[in-house]
Amino acid sequence: MAIMSCTDKALADACYILTTGNSGGHFLQEPNSKSMPNDATLNGLHHDGLENNGASTERQAVSAEADTMSAPTDPEVKELNPVDFIQLQQYIEYCSLKVKDVLREFDKDGRLAQHRHGECINEEGFREFLKTYLEVDFPSDLCQRLFRSFQNSEPTQEDSTKEVFLKDVSCYFSLLEDGQPRDKLEFAFRLYDRDGNGVLDSSEVDRIIAQMMHAAEYLDWDVSELKPVLKDMMTAIDADCSGTVSLDEWVEGGMNNVPLLVLLGLKMIQKDGQHLWRMKNFNKPVYCNVCQSMLLGLRKQGLCCSCCKYTVHGRCANKNPAPCARTYVKSKKEMGVPVHDWVSGNCDSRKCDRCQKKIKSLQGLTGKHCVWCHTMRHDECAALEPTECTCGTLRDHILPPWAIYPVIKERPNNVKNGCSGSTDDSDLNITPDGQVLQISPVPNTHPLLVFVNPKSGGKQGERVLRKFQYLLNPRQVYNLSNGGPGAGLSFFRNLQDYRILVCGGDGTVGWILDAIDKANLLVRPPVGVLPLGTGNDLARCLRWGGGYDGEDLARIIKDIESSSQVLMDRWSVQVIPDEIQEKGDPVPYEIINNYFSIGVDASIAHRFHSMREKHPQKFNSRMKNKLWYFEFATSETISASCKKLSESLTIECCGTPLDLSALSLEGIAILNIPSMHGGSNLWGETKKADTKGQASQEEPEVIVNPEILKVTSQDLSDRRLEVVGLEGAMEMGQIYTGLKSAVRLAKTSQITMRTKKALPMQIDGEPWMQPPCTIHITHKNQACMLMAPPAKPSGFFK
């Protein structure tokens, strides 16, 4: 698993502390115990070996919340409750394995075969199932309650002999990981059906309501009016008024019951006209778009649509609210007809864009705002000219509904190589009647295709996803946890002039660049980065910064408009073991975007990674992560495990061997970009050279002359790699603080390395232990990236 964003920054900070002895005030900040740690970030989802860094870190964060979430109010309660259900979904959300992978471990030759008794497993086997599947130490009390929820045995049976069917367990968890609301509702019904008679009776319904109140309180809902709403909701689900609720009634009623879906944390798939609800806390008076009365309460008072900001009470969500804004036109005849899509209310104290007068509160729904241009007007001004929607300041980036239309054509079974790996991906761009959506962009615009990794940066990714769904057309904003980038690339593949924005860490960017390679697009679009989490070396080099601090996303989109295109080299890496039989860790990547290293820094990262895999509960905060890194960096300084690296390693640059015998090195780094470990510049600043008469000279394939290297600078697109030597962990701290740079060894277009013993290595922040091998690094291609405009000077002197 990758440990990129977390480990790079922590490694640099640890080395800085090791060098200076100064932890700095910021180092001792503890995250909020109920939120994900700041650097518990998934820098990309697990995808064909691509980074899964944050998956384990996020799982640890979830694990850290286990005591708070899973502990029932009454310690004697042994049954699963909705809070447990919510936490279970959180665990599975950050899980990299599939149920079928775990089931193989229970086969005759599997690692967990001894826990299987025929078709059943006991509680110990169930605990091992969860530990393997979720890759974290699962809370024992929650494990016990979950195990009992699967049991059909008599209560008098001894705990040691109780068993559950492995088939049932695998089936239920498979449904959970698929994430379809209907399947999750069925799963929830079976948990609530305590006596197993196939219906929910009144006593079970009352218990469900009590448990839902408990879950709502945990989720910070305002529950003052929730109980009667829940009772009415459960009564409405009883379609035949029999006093009991069958499975069919539960599922059908639940699918049409917004508060139930939101409360259970079931993700709704947005369809045209369907609101994308979330519970929200409002810090000023807000009125319901259905009943037009004020939303009351001190905490989360109502539901708000992420796409159009339509707002309702929980009790009003099922009262046929007005549909969400359309995302495409119904026929080609409506193409190119720009009209406002107004949503009433909640414009209090804003200025009307038509008459420039203040929109005053009338103790009710006040004013209207357009979903596409975000203009606000008085109710009476909304009908006045101009009636055409210009899409506002973000016109260059938005795909308005009048630029998307349905056509009837045969759908392909699949689109290979990441463009639409599953029918689920294709379904995102298919109308309910089976027509395929196509784009005809507004002339002289550059539509923006946005990919968001919702797991990056703790909760940052989720917030960014919601904001972009409001600022742009939801059909141009893709959640990478819902099938990856295939659907988005497929939807935009016929466009000639568009841009891509990747919201996530460096690993997420690498994932998208790989998908673009495999998609065989007509045009390779330029890629910009909104960095989430920490580290983000690539984003730093492209001037997008080291992390997102909550800036106005509309301003960031405008920066994309004024950005410039640059080419970035990408490199293929081939690792060939000397002995095929000798097993080492799997090589994480086949492509280098940022850097490759062997030795001291990879050793520290590998120690951290290994310890975290064994004891994830010890790595549940940013501060703890840095302290562990400090400890590993200190022990590495003392042990010097990679001392005399030159005796175990040879390097050839375009056939020219590097002489390392005169140097005392503990690490080698191969750089593609001028940033490593969250901002460290190992190559350092370059002296100015006398360039008279050299303007037309092409840089040689390899440079090893120290004097020439002193005046050689780095370039993202020069088809060259820089090779530097690291003297030890102490020196890495000095590099991070800018006191010195690494030893420049070469600049080359091709590298071959041979190792004589097992050594720690890492690619773009993901470490592994590699037995003796030969490594070939060659140029693969160049990706078109977006370089952010230079930062505007601030302060008095401009």
Image (cartoon, rainbow, N blue to C red):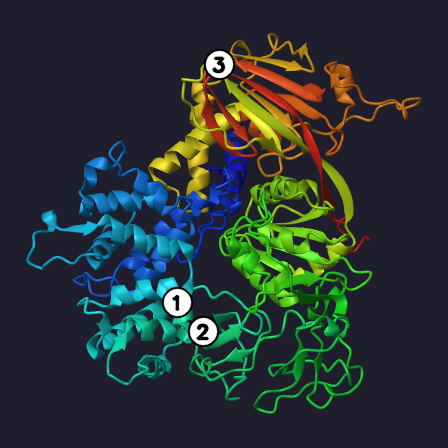
- Tell me if 58 is positioned left or right of 564 in this view: left
Which label lies toward us, 3 or 2? 3
- Whether residue 201 sits left or right of residue 558 in the image: it is left
What kind of residue is marked 3? Asp
Label 2 sits on a secondary structure element that is: loop
Identity of the residue drawn at 32% across and 58% down: 68
Q: Quadrant of residue 371?
A: bottom right
Which residue is the site of mark 2? 300
CA distance for labels 3 and 2 = 60 Å
Can residue 82 be seen at all in this image of the molecule? no
* Residue located beneath label 1 in the image: 219
Above or below for 264 versus 161 = below
Label 3 belongs to which residue?
A: 578
The circle on residue 544 is none
Secondary structure of the residue carrying tag 1 is loop
Number of residue marks: 3
Amino acid on which the number 1 mark rests in the picture: Leu
Which residue appears at 57% of the width and 28% of the height? 732
Residue 98 in the image: state x and y as whole percent. Answer: 39, 46
Callouts 1 and 2 close, C-beta under 8 Å: yes
The first of marks 1 and 3 along the sequence is 1
Question: What is the CA distance from the residue labelled 1 to the residue labelled 2?
Answer: 9 Å
